[in-house]
Image: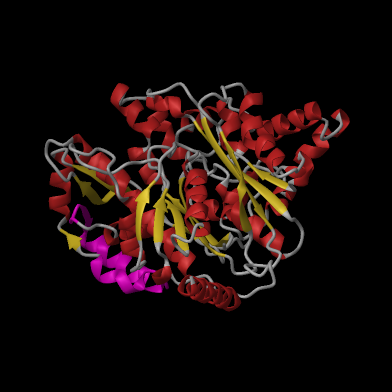
Amino acid sequence: MSEAVLKGSSYVLVHAANTLLQHGSTQTSERAQNSDSEYLKQAPEFLRKYEDVVAYGPNQSYIGNISVQDLEEIERPWYENKIQEAKRFSDWGEIMPEDEFYGLMKMADSFDLVQLSEEFAQDIKEKLTDHNLLKDQLEKIEGTELKTIQKNVDNHTAEPLYLEEKLVGCVKQAHDTDVNLNAHTMLENTVVKASGALSMLHLGKQEGIDLAEIDYVIEVSEEACGDINQRGGGNFAKAIAEMAGCKKATGSDTRSFCAGPAHGLVHAAGLVKSGVFDNVAVVAGGSTAKLGMNGKDHVDKEMPILEDCLGGFAVLVSADDGESPVIRTDAIGRHTVDTGSSPQAVIASLVTNPLDEIGLGITDIEKYSVEMQNPEITEPAGAGDVPASNYKMIAALGVKRGDLEKKDLMNFVDKHGMPGFAPTQGHIPSGVPFIGHANKLMEAGEIQRAMIIGKGSLFLGRMTNLFDGVSFIIEENTGQGNKETGISEDEINNIVAKAMRNLADNLTEE
C-alpha cells in the first residue's frame, strides 16, 4: 500500500484594501450602525499601498520568498522594517494587486454577475497579458457601460467594486429574493473561487505537477455556496477545478471553521493511501468578511490596518514518489466529542495522544505548525501572540509528562516553534502555511518531522459549544516507497498468479 505524500503546495495573497473598506464584516457592521462613524472616516488614511504589502516580511514568508527563520531575524514592528527588493512572485505563488484581482473575478464569473466598466476592463486586460498563468483566459474579461454599473449599485442589486474611491465595477445579485444568492453573498463566493483558482494555477506550474492528472479536489475555505433550497450545498471544489483546468477531477467541499484545511488534508491522505485516488488537491480561497476584522484596534494604535490581504493555498497529496514528505496516517490527532474544552485536554488530544500511538515524545517533532496568525495583527486587539501561546501550552504539557525539564520550557518554544506569519483569514493560518517551508527544510535535511495542527471554533455556528481540531505528522521521505519488502509490484503479481494457478490445480485434482 502506497504512502500519501505532500507533492507540492502553493500560497497566494491578494491585496484588497478597497474590498476591506466596502465589504469587510467590521466595516459593513459599522456602516449599518453608524454611517457617520469616526472609524470609517479615519480608516482610508491607515490603508497600505500595494508596494508596502509586498515588502512586508510576514507576506514574503507566506509566499515562500523568505524562510520563517529569516522573518524571525527582522526587527519588529515588521511593517516599519520593510524588505528591500521584495518580489511579487515566488516559486509557490504571488501577492496580487487588487485591480488585477477584479479582472480575475471576472474570469471566474460563470453567470455574468461581475461587471467591469469598459475603460477598466480594457486596461486590466492589457495589464494581465503579462501574467503567465492568466493570459490564456483574457477573452472572459468584457466591459459594461459605467452607467449600467452605477444603476445596479444605486438600486442595491449589486455590490460595488472601487479603486481609490472610483467605481470600476460591481457584483450583481443572482436572484431578487433568495438571500443565499444576494449580491453580497455572490461577491464573497466569487472571491473564494477566484483566489482558490489562482492558488491552484500556481500549484500547477510547479515541477512534476500536472493539474490535468488530479483526480479529486477538496475545497476547505469557510464560505458556503448554494441557493434557498440547499444553502451551503456547494461545490467550490468543482468550480475551482473547472477554472484551473483540472479536467479529470471531481470533488467536494469540507467545512469545519478554521480546522477545515487539516480535515481536508487528512481526507486526502486517506483517499490516496487507500488507493481510491492517486492525486488529491486540497485548496482554499480567501475570506472577504475577515478583511479589516481588527481594523478599529489598528487605527486606535495609529498603525496600518494589516488585515488587508485575502489568502489562498493549494496542496497536492499524491501516491508515494520516494521523495516528497510523507503524511503519517497512523498518528492522526483529533478533538473528539468527549475531549472537553480545557487547553490541556485540547493539546493532549491533538499533540501527545497521536505521538503516543507511534512511540514518539514531544521533542521528537522538530517543528509544530499551530494557529500561525501574525502577532502584529492580533496583539493590538488584545488577543496576544497566538502561536506563542500554543507553543507554551505544548511545552507545559511536555514538562508535565516528563518529556522535558521545566527549565527547558522556553528553549522548547524557541526551538520547536516559529513566529506567526499568516493573515488572520480564519482557515488560512490554521497549520497549513508551514507545509511549504517544512518541505524545503526536509529536502535540505534540516528537520525530519513536523506536526500540522488545525483548530476550529464550532460554537460560532450556534449548533454546539464544542471546539474542533485535527492534527497530522509529516515526515521526511526515506525513499523506500513501496519497496520496503524488497519485492517489486510485478513480482507480487507473479506470486499471486502462481498461487491462483496452484489453487486451481488442487481443486481440479480433488
Front-most of residues 419 and 406: 406
Q: In the rendered image, which quarter is residue 402 located in?
A: top right
| Figure check: 445 above or below 433 | below
Is any atom of residue 454 visible in this view? no
State left or right for residue 457 relative to residue 150.
Answer: right
Front-most of residues 433 and 32: 433
State left or right for residue 510 relative to residue 399.
Answer: left
**Magenta-colored stretch includes residue 99:** no
Placement of the N terminus among the 4 image quadrants: bottom right
Front-most of residues 357 and 236: 357
SS majority, magenta: helix
Q: Which residue range is magenta in the image?
A: 111-140
| Figure check: 6 above or below 76 | below
Q: Residue at x 19, y 52 (%)?
A: 113
How many numbered marks appear?
0
Q: Residue at x 26, y 63 (%)?
A: 121
Is any atom of residue 156 visible in this view? yes
State left or right for residue 141 relative to residue 297.
Answer: left
Front-most of residues 129 and 49: 129
Q: In the rendered image, which quarter is residue 326 located in?
A: bottom right
Q: Give the image location of residue 241, x and y in percent.
A: 35, 61
Q: Give the image location of residue 391, x and y in percent.
A: 70, 35
Q: In the rendered image, which quarter is residue 399 located in?
A: top right
